[in-house]
Image: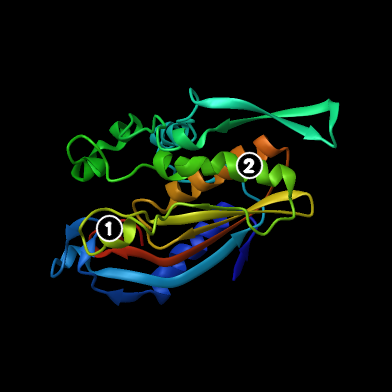
Amino acid sequence: MRLYMNAEEAFEEIKRDLSEMGIKVYPKTMQDKYIWGNPDYETLELQNYNYTILDITSDSIPGVVQPWADLEFGERITDPYSQRRYAKVNWENGDKDKQQYSWVVLKDDIDKGNFINPGKAYLERFDVWEEYLHDGKLAYTYNELIWKNDQLTKVIERIKEDPDSRQLWLSLWDNSKHIDLLGGVSRVPCSLGYGFQVREGKLNMHYVMRSCDFSTHFRNDVYLAVKLLEYVAKETGYPVGNFTHTIFSLHIYKKDAEGVF
């Protein structure tokens, strides 16, 4: 695993690795598009790529598409259950003077959230997202994925209760749904999930992706993941630690390579 001090250093080395060590592959589909035989989509790929940035902040990440990225993040963390939460009293050793409250969603309401799809952020990159709109909606949004089963709230609460836990995983892949959408049937998430760890007093993140387009999405994906790390760190009271990123397929298409390398 490669270690970097900052994002700018990391991105330059990652670009070099992709250029010098990437192999050519020829996928049949890209998201919900059939691309077999299209020379524009000849793909240069790094497999199972992994790195860690030791000192990272979202504002230190170069090349982010704004204002789209901040609007997108705002939609991602908008609580779809905000009108359906109920106060639950948590007692500490039965002492009424130490009662605490958490805001929970009842089981019967867990599928009734006001999820955002498509939202408004996509309009800032309409040239990218227009082709993936079907009947006015996207196949998925990260607001839907991050908040499914109220998991973001549950992960944050678990960090507060058990910071040494090894179970702090926020999953974006729904195996009951996405496994049947492969092969160009529909878009499926490029991001699989986020793992959190509190170690040595700091909150670390391990971001796992199955696929990442280096030219179009890589810098934005990292930015949005680090924004989430900063958000969870603020909610739990920990300083931001390091950021680790694993990508099963980090790639660039032939049509984009000339403008990058």
Snapshot quadrant of residue 109: top left
Q: Residue at x 26, y 58 (%)?
A: 181
* Residue ID for mark 2: 156
Front: mark 1 or 2: 2
Badge number at residue 229: none
Q: Quadrant of the C terminus?
A: bottom left
Q: Residue at x 42, y 54 (%)?
A: 218
Residue type, numbered disc 2: Ile
* Residue ID for mark 1: 256
Q: Residue at x 18, y 41 (%)?
A: 134
Snapshot quadrant of residue 234: top right
What SS does tag 1 mark?
helix
Please determine whether, in this image, residue 94 is positioned above or below residue 243. above
Q: Residue at x 32, y 70 (%)?
A: 44
What SS does tag 2 mark?
helix
Along the line of sight, which residue is nearer the eye, 202 or 9? Answer: 202
Please determine whether, in this image, residue 221 is positioned above or below residue 255. above
**Label 1 to label 2: alpha-carbon separation:** 38 Å
Along the line of sight, which residue is nearer the eye, 147 or 76? Answer: 147
Along the line of sight, which residue is nearer the eye, 12 or 250? Answer: 250
